[in-house]
Amino acid sequence: AFPSRVRIVEVGPRDGLQNEAAQVPTGIRLELIDRLGEAGLRTIEAGSFVSPRWVPQMTDTADLVRRLKRRPGVAYPVLVPNEKGLDAALAAGADEIAVFAAASQAFSRKNINCSVEESLARFAPVLERALANGIRVRGYVSCVLGCPYQGDVAVADVVRVAGELTAMGCYEISLGDTIGVGTPLAARRLVDAVSASIPLQHVAVHFHDTYGQALANIFACLERGVSVVDSSIGGLGGCPYAKGATGNVATEDVVYMLQGMGVETGVSLDRLIETSLFIARALGRAPRSHLAMARTAG
Ligand code: HMG
Ligand code: MG
């Protein structure tokens, strides 16, 4: 059955902007995050504490987190790959973090320079210390429906990594179709398999729209009761370590679909579209979401 309410996890300021050729000024990132909060989003991924050599676009995340104009009831998670990242996140005053593992060995090596097992061993002390500091931890699993380096990914590998992250204390597992190759029935089968071992309320879907399947995939998972959806304003995004990956499904397109289905999101579509146009202008290009294109046509 469809959920009556969906929580949108806005990942544009991180997943979106990490993939821009040019580094976006901190002031623009802050304004983007503020506008997203104004639009009603309650989880806004703000940035990442990763190596500046690997992802230079996120270099100013510490400064950004310190300067965030926090709204009551809004969480601003940041990505953390290891204890060094956690130290920096804690020092900046981050309120929530996300660790990111993969279901594919090949992608894990390209993205974080270690095997899946090594990454999980690295996350264990990160989770332990974060939780001891009262910081909630979200867990990502990448390449859940395919890998740019190894091709097929076994459902059992996704289930195992999702289970281990949950056992370590992640409050939610976000299933990432990093390169957007999934199709609806595969996405639904995956959710069925994962939710056989962890509670469905703890499962989020994170679909990139590379092959135009993201909304259909989301619909198929909503039908199973999934109630947390990651998306990116204006469809910004991709992953610098997944060649050919394009943006996440656009937040405004997801909200439009949910509104039409009578599913509550607490988000203002008009505000979202304004925000989408704001960031497109700041990046100097036309907006890419269906909604922004439809509303600005003619
Ligand atoms: P490494 O080179 O193996 O790290 O990188 P190392 O531990 O050997 O350290 C090398 C240098 O990096 C040292 O500096 C460390 O201090 C520094 P040096 O002594 O050479 O000057 N370093 C750090 N600096 C800042 N922050 C840190 C940090 N850690 C080490 N946290 C590492 C390993 C994990 C650091 C690197 O591979 C990395 O940063 N990778 C991040 C890649 C990334 O951000 N990818 C995008 C996010 S994932 C994604 O987009 C997918 C997702 O959206 C879901 C989906 O769509 O599927 C989440
Ligand atoms: Mg992503």
Image (cartoon, rainbow, N blue to C red):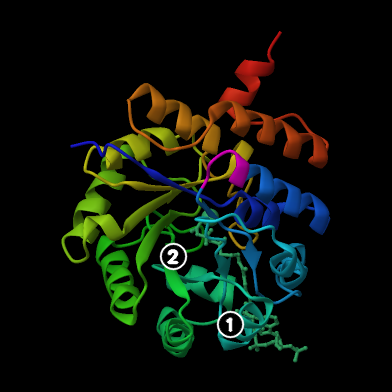
- Of residues 66 and 287, the one nearer the viewer is 66
SS assignment for the magenta stretch, majority: loop
Q: Amino acid at mark 1?
A: Leu
Q: Residues within 10 Å of mark 2 (few under 14, many from 20)?
A: many
Q: Residues within 10 Å of mark 1 (few under 14, many from 20)?
A: many
Q: Which residue is mark 1?
A: 86
What range is drawn magenta here?
Answer: 37-41
Q: Residue 291, position in %: x, y?
A: 57, 24
- Where 210 falls versus 98 (above or below)? above
Q: Residue 164, position in %: x, y?
A: 30, 77
Instruction: Name which residue lies at 32% across and 40% down.
Output: 5
- Based on the picture, tell me whether residue 39 belongs to the magenta stretch: yes
Q: Mark 2 touching mark 1, by CB under 8 A?
A: no
Callout 2: CB less than 8 Å from ligand 1: yes
Which quadrant of the frame does ligand 1 lie within? bottom right
Q: Quadrant of residue 175?
A: bottom left
Q: Which residue is mark 2?
A: 140
Q: Residue 134, position in %: x, y?
A: 45, 79
**Quick check: 178 left or right of 297?**
left
User: Which secondary structure lies at badge 2?
Assistant: strand
Instruction: Name which residue lies at 54% across and 56% down.
Output: 72
Q: Can the viewer see residue 28 in this picture?
A: yes
Residue furthest toward the front? 72
Callout 1: CB less than 8 Å from ligand 1: yes
C-alpha separation, residue under disc 2 versus residue under disc 1: 16 Å
- Where 48 falls versus 272 (above or below)? below
- Of residues 72 and 58, the one nearer the viewer is 72
- Based on the picture, tell me whether residue 230 belongs to the magenta stretch: no
Instruction: Name which residue lies at 41% across and 55% down.
Output: 146
Q: Quadrant of residue 71?
A: bottom right
Quarter of the picture containing the N terminus is top left
Instruction: Name which residue lies at 48% across and 84% down.
Output: 133
